[in-house]
Amino acid sequence: MIKKNFLLNYFLIIIVISSSIYFLWLIKLLNDFPWRYVFTDWIINYKGGYIRRGLLGEVSINLSNFLDLKIKYVFFLIHLFIYLLFHLLFYKYFSNFKRNYVFYLLCFSPLVFLYPIATFEAFARKEIFYITFFLLNCYLSIKIYNRNIIFFTTNLFILLSYFIHESSLFFINFFYLSYFVFLKKNNYKIKLSEIFFIFIIYLIVLFLLFIPVTDDKLSTMVFFINQNFFEITEFSGAISWLQRSASSSFSFLEHNYISMKYIFQNILFLHFLIIFLYLLYINNFFRSGKYVFVFTILVFFSPLVLFTVGNDWGRFVYILYNFCLIFTFYCLYDDKKVFVKIDKLPIITNLDYKFKLFFTVSYISLWTPKLFFFDNVEFFPLFNLILDLIKYSIKYSTILF
């Protein structure tokens, strides 16, 4: 019986396959050390003083020294850990629900697991850390009922996220909205002391955002990296972005021509915002408080500010989808049959079941965004991934030996 149940657990099987592919792709990435952009981002550290997004590099450098291990293998182990943790938490989090084609349609959208491995330039970027932190915090909020613990973990993960990458600033609201949903679910009253503490956290993060990266800081850090790890300059990859001020980031729109084609294409990518808001609406989430609707709209749409500061629009869509997915089903977590109920909605219940299966397979396998705003949509990414998997698995499987 146990064996039979395991074999029928397609969710677990897909998770295992996905985590295996991520493992192989990390090996492939390791073979590209140190020339890829991500390595210049991972190595940013505090040797010259505080520099935004430097926490991960500082931890990696100290682990490298402590373990007497080359930095590229430390990078590999840290990112393997975070990806395996994400897969494990995702399985634990969503295994609560009764599964059908709607479940696979939403949970295996190309914007969850497929995008980072189909678009290799987006693979192993730092957003996986704060996506995983949010998933972990929501999971803890389900399992733990102590408000002090959850309030602590919420703020801890927010700060860790920011110190890893400042783009997490645009997703802080998801953390705090989920905390207030936690309070509502457990019939806790809002404390003014917590509101004040949250306000302080916002001030701290904004203060850190505007700390300049001086020439002395940057040159000291670059010299340290060159002496101990690999050759870079102040103009290498992610290093070149560090001296841009927060205000100058908004000059992106002044220096880039963005046609209506690309705006329309990315609006289509954001169709999930309407889907998740609709699911919250039909499940009476917005009846839980008179300001909940307004706050949720602001939380869902405020990260779109990122589209005015950077050209990695595909990554921004990917991050936002994961936050919306996790938050939506955190709010609906008590209803184990929510995916079954979605199938019974009038607009889809009368559709032929074979058509719904065909649509699901097509949706999760036939498209994904690329990295930049000027890239066209990639078609057949799952098919291309399978071909790449065959091509690279043999080539790179021996690199660790």
Image: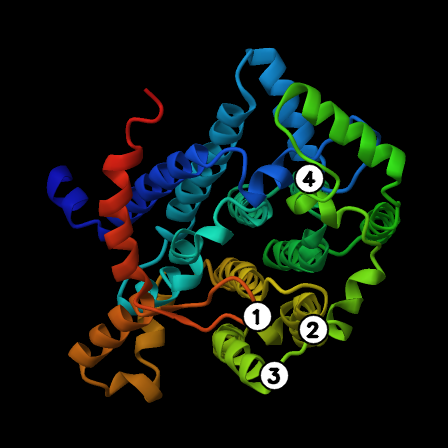
The amino acid beneath tag 1 is Phe
The circle drawn on residue 95 is: none
Q: Nearer the viewer's eye, disc 4 or disc 2?
A: 2
The amino acid beneath tag 2 is Asn
| Camera-nearest residue between 261 and 366 | 261
What is the quadrant of residue 248 in the picture?
bottom right
Q: Which residue is mark 1?
A: 373
Give whichever of discs 4 and 2 has the lower sequence position.
4
Q: CA distance from mark 2 to mark 1?
A: 10 Å
Give whichever of discs 1 and 4 has the lower sequence position.
4
Q: CA distance from mark 4 to mark 2?
A: 32 Å
Question: Which quarter shows the C terminus?
Answer: top left
Q: Which residue is mark 3?
A: 259
Q: Is residue 225 left or right of residue 24?
A: right
The amino acid beneath tag 3 is Ser
Q: CA distance from mark 1 to mark 4?
A: 28 Å
Q: Nearer the viewer's eye, disc 2 or disc 1?
A: 2
Residue 395: x and y in percent read 27, 36
